[in-house]
Each structure stands twice: as C-alpha cells, then as structure tokens.
C-alpha cells in the first residue's frame, strides 16, 4: 500500500467532510443538524455553533486534511509492516 497515496486519500476525505461542515455553518444550518445528530444518540446538546468565520473555517479544513494525511500515512505504514 502506498503510504503517500493513502495519506492523500485520508486527508482528502477528512478535508471534504469538514468542508461540508463549514458550508452548513455558512448557511446557518449547522446548529439544527448538530442538535438532530445529538438527539439521535439520546443526548442533550450543550454546544452552540459559532458564527461563520472564513479564517477559522479555512484553518479547520487545513488542519483536518493534514491530520487525515498523517492518519492515512500511519495506517499504510502499519498495514505494510503487518502484511509483509
């Protein structure tokens, strides 16, 4: 398994998921969605979604993509070492 390609795949997936979340925030739909998901888990939601901020949102997507890349790279490294 190619570690770099796996890292890019995980990073793209994490970045895309967080991009969807940022779009929900920008459209003022995030709080309702978050409340609904929490209620499905039979929990109360003490959190309030903050207003949209472009810099904070871009940083969220970048950090998520980097963390996803690292997770994918580590996953592929472990996979390759186990399957030798």
Image: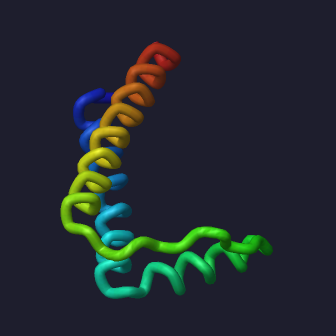
Residue 33, compared with residue 43, is above or below; it is below
In the rendering, at what x and y percent does residue 18 appear? 35, 62
Q: Can you say which quadrant of the picture contains the C terminus? A: top left
Q: Is residue 71 left or right of residue 39?
A: left
Examine the image and state in which quarter residue 25 appears.
bottom left
Marks counted in the figure total 0
In the rendering, at what x and y percent does residue 39 appear? 71, 79
Q: Is residue 79 left or right of residue 16?
A: right
* Outermost residue, right side: 42
Which residue is at the front of the view, 50 or 39? Answer: 50
In this figure, which colouring scheme has been used for the structure? rainbow
Residue placed at 62% from the left, 76% from the top?
A: 37
Residue 55, compared with residue 74, is above or below; it is below
Which residue is at the front of the view, 84 or 14? Answer: 14
Residue placed at 30% from the left, 76% from the top?
A: 23
Q: Can you say which quadrant of the picture contains the N terminus? A: top left
Residue 5, compared with residue 63, is above or below; it is above
In the rendering, at what x and y percent does residue 41 appear? 74, 71
In the rendering, at what x and y percent does residue 46 appear? 66, 70
Residue placed at 30% from the left, 74% from the top?
A: 52
């Amino acid at each position: 398994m190619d570690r770099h390609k796996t890292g890019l795949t995980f990073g793209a997936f994490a970045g895309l998921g967080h991009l969807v979340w940022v779009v929900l925030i920008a459209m003022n739909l995030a709080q309702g969605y978050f409340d609904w998901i929490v209620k499905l888990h039979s929990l109360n939601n003490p959190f309030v979604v903050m207003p949209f901020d472009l810099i904070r949102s871009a940083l969220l997507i970048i950090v998520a993509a980097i963390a996803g890349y690292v997770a994918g790279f580590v996953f592929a490294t472990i996979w390759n070492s186990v399957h030798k």
